[in-house]
Amino acid sequence: MSKTLRNQLQELLRTDSEFQAFFADHFPEVARSFDGLDRVAKENLVLAAIPAQRLQDKLRLAQEYSLALSAPSTYGGLLGAALRLDRSTQWADIVDTRDKTECILFLLHGQRERAGLPFFVDRICRHLAPEQGERCRIVRVPFLVDAVGARTGADWALRLHSELAQSVGLRGNRDTRDLLGLATARQPFFVLLGRQPLPPLDEAEREGLREFLVEELPKLVRGLCYLRFLLVHDYEKPKESQIERMHAWATQGALAGDHRVRTLDEAVLPTWEHARKYLHDHTRLSTTRIDALKLDYDTLRSKKSARYDDLAALLDRKVNG
C-alpha cells in the first residue's frame, strides 16, 4: 500500500508547491512539520503520520476535483452528490442575504470528515459565482502561507490585501479599504477567510484570529456595503471545536464596527430529506426507486463512523449502478 500511495503522491502532486498546498489544505497538522525537509522526507512523514485509507481517499477526491476544474461541463457528473448533497439551513441563510447592502460575517462549523465542509464551501462559491453571469466576486484568503498559519491580525489583513489586489487587478499603494470599496462598486463581494475550513488552532493562531476579528475587520469594513465574509471551522472531535471563542470574538468586533455576525447551525450529516431532494432534483430516478433507498441511507447515516463522503458515495453508486 505504501508503495502505491507514494506513486500516487508523485503522479498527482508533481511539484513541491502542489505537494505543499495539498497537505496544507487537507492535513495542516502534518504540513506544519515540513519545514526544512526535502521531498522524499516529506513523503516519508505523511506515509507514517496519515492512515493509508484516509490519505488515499483525499488523493482520489483531489484527482476528481482537478479533472472537474479542467472540464467544467462535466463537473457535476464527476462529483455528483458530493457537491449537491447539502444542508438547506446553512445554504439558505447565506444565499438569502446575497443582495442585502450590509456587511455580514458568517461563522460555520462542523466535524471534519462527517460534515464534508469543503464541499459545502465549494458549492456556495459555485452558486454565488457561476461560470456564466457572475453574481458575486469571490476571494479565498489563505490561512497557511508556506505552511505557517496566520499568527497576528496583521497577518490576516496582509493576506486579505494580497488576494484582493490580485482579484481586483490593482497593485501598488492602494490600501485594503480602497480595494474592498472597488471590489464592491459593481457587485457584491464574498470573502472566504481560509481557502479550506480552519483546523484546530494553536495558541498563537488563535490570538491572530482574535486580533483580526476584534480589531482589524471592523476597521476594514466600516462604511462599506455588499461585503460577505465566511469563516469555516472544522475539527476531528466536538471537544476540539473553537466556535464559541470565534463567535465571542466576532461579536465583540461587530460591536466596534457596523457589520453583523451570523453564526450558522452546526453542519451535520445530511438527513434523508436532503438526500431525497438531491435525488429528485438531480437524477432521473423514479419516486418509487428513490424511496426504496431510504433504508440504506438511514442505516449508513446512523453509524458513528459515517462520513459525508460515505453518504455521497452511496447515492452515486445507487444512481449509477
Image: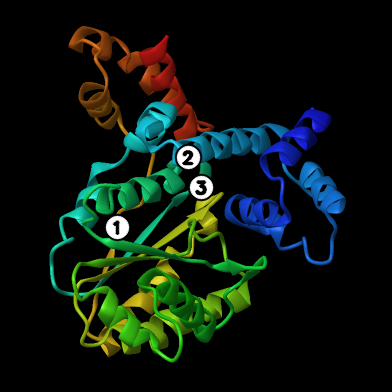
User: Which residue, as the protein is rendered here, is positioned at the far left?
Assistant: 100
Q: Name the quadrant of the C terminus.
A: top left
Residue that badge 3 annotates = 112
The type of colouring in the image is rainbow
| Amino acid beneath label 3 | Arg
SS assignment at label 2: helix
Query: From the viewer's perspective, is residue 134 above or below residue 300?
Result: below
Measure the C-alpha gap from mark 1 to mark 3.
16 Å
Residue drawn 67% across the image and 31% down it: 53
Circle 1 packing at 10 Å, graded few (<14), some (14-19), many (20+), is some
For marks 1 and 3, the one nearer the N-term is 3
Residue that badge 1 annotates = 264
SS assignment at label 1: loop
Q: Is residue 202 left or right of residue 287?
A: right
| Amino acid beneath label 1 | Leu
Residue 215 at x, y = what percent?
40, 88
Residue that badge 2 annotates = 70
Q: Name the quadrant of the N terminus.
A: top right
Instruction: Write down the quadrant of residue 250 in the picture.
Output: bottom left
| Amino acid beneath label 2 | Ser
Residue 105 at x, y = what percent?
30, 70
For residue 299, say whether it is visible.
Answer: no
Q: Is residue 320 left or right of residue 96?
A: right
For marks 2 and 3, the one nearer the N-term is 2
